[in-house]
Image (spheres, grey):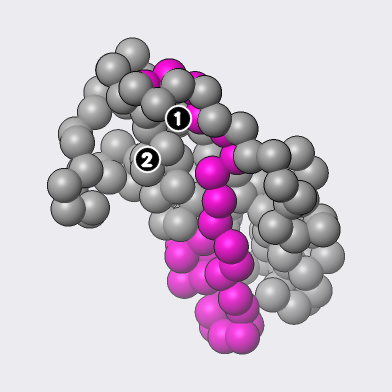
Amino acid sequence: MTSETASAVAQGAIKKGDVLAVARVAGIQAAKRTSDLLPLCHPLLVGAVTVNFEINDTSIEIEAQVETVDRTGVEMEALTACGISALTIYDMCKSLDRGMVIGEVALWEKTGGRSGHYRRTDAPLDSNLSD
């Protein structure tokens, strides 16, 4: 996004309202409805969802964390939360900046489930991201 768009989001100057608050709620709702959106994805009891944002000069980083007590992981719920949060940001800011790009989405860490623990070991997808 342009620096003007990132600044407008940070200052709460987007006409549609508080972009990050709406994007957070959208992400939480999406995580809870993932099995309705993705064919063959198991419905799970989602215990907690957090969606956080970091505003940079020309981007907004999104991080989602999902917890469950079910027997499987909730990585699809976390990835869905990030994607829908990003789409919400785009929708709310498109009148100011139609050139925004939704960048790479990646799983950074997963614990539990049949496959056990996973932690990404390669370099961040974007040099602005930290581990």
Disc 1 and disc 2 in contact, CB within 8 angstroms = yes
Residue 92 or 78: which is nearer the viewer? 78
Q: Main secondary structure of the magenta part?
A: loop
Q: Is residue 119 visible?
A: yes
Q: Secondary structure at mark 1?
A: strand
Residue 70: % across, % down: 28, 17
Q: Is residue 51 above or below residue 5?
A: above
Q: Secondary structure at mark 2?
A: helix
Q: What's the mark number on residue 77? A: 2
Residue at x-position 33% and y-position 14%: 69
Q: Can you identify the residue that label 1 sits on?
A: 66
Magenta span includes 103: yes
Residue 37: % across, % down: 22, 53
Range covered by the magenta-colored residues: 86-113
Identify which amino acid the numbered label 1 is placed on. Answer: Val
Magenta span includes 102: yes
